Image (cartoon, rainbow, N blue to C red):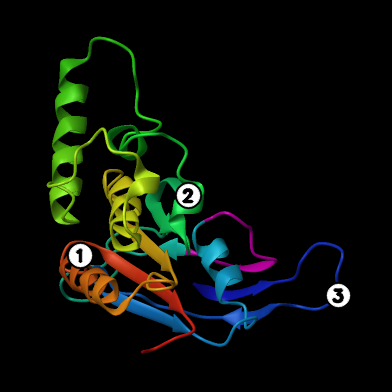
């Protein structure tokens, strides 16, 4: 994120001014601030849901000696996974399997693609600890902690370059919070994580 500013259309005041963030690959980043400080706006900009008024957001890859090995690549929505606060509000199917695979190709044929998707599904389900949950179970009947896991799985199957989590512990009891934190520590070994929160506890 380089020199990013954002001014809502029709207004004269910037919500964000020349923000700069550098997040190394397979690292854990935290955006912390009070409610109304612009955290969610920045999240939406990084995820590509909103365009910045000025500045740029991109991926720069480096060699082992620290030199850029290619031109900067734009960070597009397809390369970013995002889990919103209270993700259960965004569930749109009536079973776990359809929720995780929503948007996948449904046409017959292409065995190689089906095998790839099945592998991604299995990996995502196992990595977030959903392998003991029936795939025909209604997502809305899951506990708060398992709803977060399901939301994580739906993003992990896409294999994003960056996974953003907006207030991932909001509304959870202490046990569910501990479970989510445990999974996040595991996930940061595999991909880049960016957490947005107003609560460091």
* Numbered circle sitting on residue 77: 2
Q: Residue at x 56, y 62 (%)?
A: 44
Please, is residue 116 above or below residue 75 in the view? above
**How many other residues sit within 10 Å of disc 3, few (<14), some (14-19) or many (≥20)?**
few
Q: Nearer the viewer, residue 171 or 3?
A: 171
Q: Position of residue 59 (x, y in %)?
A: 38, 62
Q: CA distance from mark 3 to mark 1?
A: 40 Å
Q: Position of residue 60 (x, y in %)?
A: 36, 64
Asked if the residue under mark 3 is in contact with the one under mark 2, i.e. CB atoms within 8 Å, the reply is no
Disc with the residue nearer the chain's start (3 vs 1):
3
Q: CA distance from mark 2 to mark 3?
A: 27 Å
User: Residue 68, located in which quarter of the rendered image?
Assistant: bottom left
User: Residue 96, located in which quarter of the rendered image?
Assistant: top left
Decide if residue 24 is on the left or right side of residue 50.
left
**How many other residues sit within 10 Å of disc 2, few (<14), some (14-19) or many (≥20)?**
some
* Residue holding disc 1: 187
Dot 3 lies on which element?
A: loop
- The magenta stretch is 48-57
Dot 2 lies on which element?
A: helix
Q: CA distance from mark 1 to mark 2?
A: 20 Å
**How many other residues sit within 10 Å of disc 1, few (<14), some (14-19) or many (≥20)?**
some
Identity of the residue furthest to the front in this view = 141
Q: Position of residue 72 (x, y in %)?
A: 41, 60
Q: Nearer the viewer, residue 184 or 139?
A: 139
* Figure quadrant of the C terminus: bottom left
* Residue holding disc 3: 12
């Amino acid at each position: 994120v380089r020199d990013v500013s954002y001014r809502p259309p029709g207004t004269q005041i910037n919500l964000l001014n020349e923000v700069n963030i550098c997040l190394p690959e397979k690292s854990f980043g935290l955006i912390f601030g009070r409610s109304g400080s612009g955290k969610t706006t920045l999240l939406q900009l990084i995820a590509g849901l909103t365009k910045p008024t000025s500045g740029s957001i991109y991926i720069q890859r480096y060699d082992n000696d620290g030199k850029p090995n290619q031109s900067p690549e734009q960070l597009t929505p397809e390369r970013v996974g995002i889990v919103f606060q209270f993700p259960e509000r965004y569930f749109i199917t009536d079973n776990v399997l359809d929720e995780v695979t929503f948007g996948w190709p449904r046409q017959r044929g292409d065995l190689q693609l089906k095998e790839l998707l099945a592998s991604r599904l299995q990996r995502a389900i196992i990595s977030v600890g959903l392998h003991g949950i029936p795939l025909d179970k209604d997502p809305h009947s899951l506990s708060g902690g398992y709803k977060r896991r399901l939301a994580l799985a739906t993003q992990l199957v896409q294999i994003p370059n960056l996974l953003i989590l907006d207030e991932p512990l909001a509304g959870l009891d202490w046990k569910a919070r501990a479970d989510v934190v445990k999974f996040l520590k595991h996930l940061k070994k595999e991909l880049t994580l960016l957490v947005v929160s107003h609560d460091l506890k």
